[in-house]
Image (tube, grey):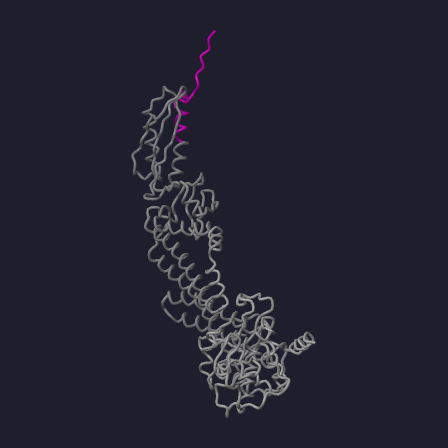
Amino acid sequence: MKTLNKLLFILALLPGTSLTGSAQIPVDSTQAKTDYQKARPQIKGYNSAFYLLSDLNTGLPERPPGVNLQTPRACLEHFVRACREEAFHKAAHALNFNMMPAAQQQEVAEARARELFYILSKSVRIDWDLLSDRPDGQINQGITAQQSITGQPLRSINFGSLDLNGQTLPLRIQRVRVEEQSPVWVVSANTVENIIPLYKAYGPSPLAQRIPAWAKTEIMGIAWWKIIGLAILITLCLLIARLSQYLINKAVKRSEQPWVNELGEKMGQPVALAISALLFYAGMKQVLSISGTWSPYLYALLLIIVIGSVTWLLMRSIDYLMDRVAERKVGDITNEENLESKRYLTMISVARKVIAFVVIVLGIGAIVSQFPSLQNLGLSLFASAGIATVILGIAAQATLGNIIAGLQIAITKPVRIGDWVLFEGEYGAVEDIRFTYLVINTWDKRRVVVPLRYFITHPFENWTMYDAHLLKPIVLHADYKIDVNLVRNKFAELLRAADAYDETLPPKVQVVDSSKESIVIRALCSARNAPIAWDLHCQLREDMVAYIARLEAGKYLAKERVKLQH
């Protein structure tokens, strides 16, 4: 029979119910004791099973027969069932009115019951599975952390909470006993005392109070007039977003300052999005009073949009400031002599990414701070961070190592944007330095992407680290009989005639090695940067090889001698 009654009650709750979802039921006997010390009349005492009162709701009529308040679930079931039947005078017996004079209790009982039911049905999600159906308040099988001591009776249980003026107010039911009567569960006196301010915050808006009853028919748990109002509000906010962006663009175009125009173009969209999202949030909460089990998710989504738009605005502002700094500090990095510009560009590039990373982290932190459940999750992870930290550290080791390597590059400057490097056989210019990798634009227009940590821990050649001028050798092989002075003079002639020669180093030709077949002649040439030095090197090699080949019909070309004996 008991099981059948439960099933019938659950079926009675199905139409339009919003009392579902998950909620913790923590035990806070100390807080409950403090609450009841404020009650009137004073409690006579308490033990581990209940609070002992001198009387309960003396201003109300005698409790009707059949009102079951023996267990936490029975108490709230009676309250919800009676309110759905609009029998608020019966529902009031599930509330503790001891904190108000007895003469006023009957006068306000029905109003407080009606207001509490509205708050519960629209703004609170109760997990009925976690509400005990035992007089001692225990959950069968003791599966929650608060039931660690099997058999310990509970005197106070939270069945939900609401935020009010920045504070979290618990909704609590407590087990009380009057003299020698059987103990009962009732909504705590402090919770009843907070119904009025909670109803002002979570109750219907002034507009909703003026809507006639026939317009309040609900569709999927929301009145159809609110659906229409929501559609109008969405349209209005979209128009306001377009209007805001138009006004911002028009205002900045009137300015004669170029920086105002650039800043306005970057900030128009995020500002318009933030304004429209804030207006939509205020309209839903203050005008339409949108509520229900799904409304917290919608409000959370709007809050994320607002914070995201502010973060977007900050990111664009940072980009603009960095671009302005780059315009003033950074010159033409294609000029290899402009080492200061390369240094500034590298610092600005790394600083932009680091600041953007910090802004994103702060934005995520702002979002998390608005949701107590996420805060609790974070604290739980932090409290049990032993194994989790090790796992996270191992998983993020490569990424964090690359980020730290990027900071190391920005501080020590072994390489800068625009430097010409030779890394593991790849020759090219450093095109970009990002969070975790850098890009080398090779001589054949390929892009070599190298993780920063790998790059900084392996040797590489930076041909423009301190000076863009580069010395390139030309190696020639010739016969022993060649006149090296002829080669020296010809090389000096060709080098001085070349436009790419920077005259930093005078022409130099030396015999640096020899073998059985030939001598090795090295000629040195310099140019103002690596690409030009490479081209000059190739051209001079070609000309010198042609000169030696023409000299006395190729007599002095390297050759291998073989002596034949009969």
Image height of 536 relative to 261, above or below:
above
**Residue lying at 39% horizontally and 35% vertically, measured from the top left:** 537
Query: Which residue extends farthest bottom?
Result: 103
Query: Which residue extends farthest top?
Result: 566
Could you tell me residue 311's position as x and y percent?
44, 65
Relative side of 563 to 49, left or right: left
Q: Nearer the viewer, residue 563 or 294?
A: 294
Q: Nearer the viewer, residue 303 or 371?
A: 371
Residue 260: quarter of image? bottom left
Relative side of 231 to 306, left or right: right
**Residue lying at 40% horizontally and 59% vertically, measured from the top left:** 355
Magenta residues (range): 543-566
- Is residue 306 a member of the stretch shown in magenta? no
Could you tell me residue 431's position as x and y percent?
42, 49
Q: So how many labels did they put on this image?
A: 0
Image height of 276 relative to 538, above or below:
below
Q: Is residue 239 visible?
A: no
Q: Nearer the viewer, residue 385 or 324?
A: 385
Could you tell me residue 271's position as x and y percent?
45, 70
- Is residue 565 a member of the stretch shown in magenta? yes
